[in-house]
Image (cartoon, rainbow, N blue to C red):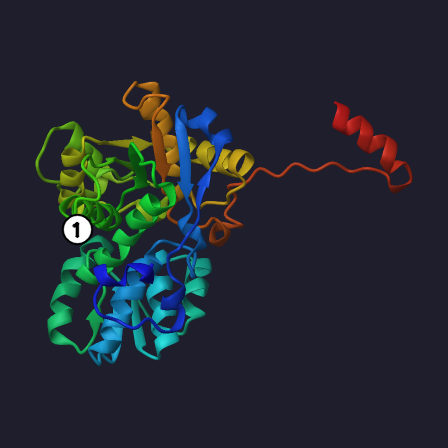
Amino acid sequence: MWRYAEALPDLRPEGIAAAAGRTPLLRSPRLDQVAGCRVYVKDEGENPTGSYKDRGSAVAVSHALQQDIDAVGTVSYGNMAMSTAAHAASLGIDCVVLVPTDTPTSRLELIAQYDPTIIQVEGEYGKLYDDVLDLNRELPISFLLSDAPARIRGYKTALFEIYEALAPDTPDAIALPASSGGFASGIWRGILEFQNAGVIDTPPRLYLVQTAASDPITRAYIADQDEVSALEAEAVGETIAHSIGNPNPPSGTRALTAVRQTGGAVCSVTDADIRQAQRQFARRGGLCVEPASATPLAGVRQLTSRGEIDEDETVVLLPTGTGFKEMGTGGVSIQTNTLSRSALSSQLASLLSS
C-alpha cells in the first residue's frame, strides 16, 4: 500500500506496517456460478494480522509514533483490536483495548498475544464509542476508532490496488461487508480522489452487505432515509457474523451516501446465507474467510437474482478477513471415511467412483 505514499500522510512505515496491503486480486470463475456474474476476489485476509484493518492501523499507529504519542487504544473485540495491538507492539507503543465483559476466551487469546492492556467494560458496549471520544480529551491515549481519519486514508488504498490490478479494465461494482461504515468510507474516498484526479469518469457501484441480525444501514436505505439511525436493543439479534453486528455505526450515514452517489445498494443476508457463502468460498474458490467476509458473495447473489446486477458485469468481492481465526466455532461440517489399510487401494477406488 505504501506504493501510494503520495496519497497518504508523510510517514515512514516501520514494523509490520510495511507489510500492510498489496493483497491479491483473484479471478475465481467457479464463484461466478454462485454470484451470478463475473467476480474477482480481493483477499484482505492476506494482511499481516489477517484483515483489512491493517491498512488503517498501519497509517494510524505510524502517525501516532510520528506524533510522539505514548499509547494508542481502540474499542473492539475482533479484527481491529488485534490489528491495533499488533501494530503498536511492532512500534513499541503501549496499547489499550476496550472489550465487552462477554468476550469469548478464544477472542481474548488472539488479542492478548500482542500484550496490550485489555479492559473488560461493564454496561452497554454499543455506547462506548461516544464515551471514548471524551476519553481522548481526558487521557494521554490516542484512541484509533473505526472512523479515525488516518484509518480511512489507509483503507482507500484497497481501491487503488483493485484498479491497478485490473488495468486497463475497470470494475462495474465493488461489494463489501458493512458494520461501522469505515471501510466503505475509505473505498469511497479513494473513488473521489480518482475522479478528482481524472483517473476515472464513472465510479464503480458500491454494494454494502449487512447481517440481517443488525442492519441499520440497510434499513435506512430501504426506507429512503438520508441518515442512519441506531437500532434499539430489542431489534438486534444474534449472528455468526459478530464482527459486523454494529447497531450504531459511526460512519453509517457516510457509507449510505457513498452507496447512493455511486448508484449502488445495501442489502442484508441471514446466517444461513452467510454459512452457505462461506462454504462456497472454500469449495469453489479455495478461500477460508470469516463469516462476515462471506457476506459480499451472499449479497451479490441476492442482487443478481433480483436483476440489480447483470450477469455480464464485473464485480469485485472484498472479503475483509481470514477465516482461520474462526476455526473451532462449529461452522464447518466434517465428513470422514474409514478405510482398511490392507484394502486401501480397492476401497479408495470404490469410494471415488461412487
Observer-nearest of 209 and 192: 192
Q: Is residue 245 left or right of residue 139?
A: right
Observer-nearest of 244 and 196: 196
Residue 240 in view of the camera: no
Which class describes the residues within 10 Å of circle 1: few (<14), some (14-19), or many (20+)? many
Q: Which residue is mark 1?
A: 250
Place of residue 243 in the rendered image (x, y in percent of width and height, measured from the top left): 34, 49
Residue 276 in view of the camera: yes
Q: Is residue 260 left or right of residue 155?
A: left
Place of residue 282 in the rendered image (x, y in percent of width and height, measured from the top left): 53, 39
Q: Which residue is farthest right?
A: 342
Q: Quadrant of the N terminus?
A: bottom left
| Rendering quarter of residue 96 | bottom left
Q: Secondary structure at mark 1?
A: loop
**Which residue type carries mark 1?**
Pro
Instruction: Please report the residue visible at 39 percent of the width from the left and 74 percent of the height from the top.
Output: 90
Instruction: Please report the residue visible at 44 percent of the width from the left and 63 percent of the height from the top.
Output: 110
Instruction: Please report the residue visible at 25 percent of the width from the left and 52 percent of the height from the top.
Output: 156
Q: Is residue 307 above or below residue 173?
A: above
Place of residue 244 in the rendered image (x, y in percent of width and height, measured from the top left): 31, 46
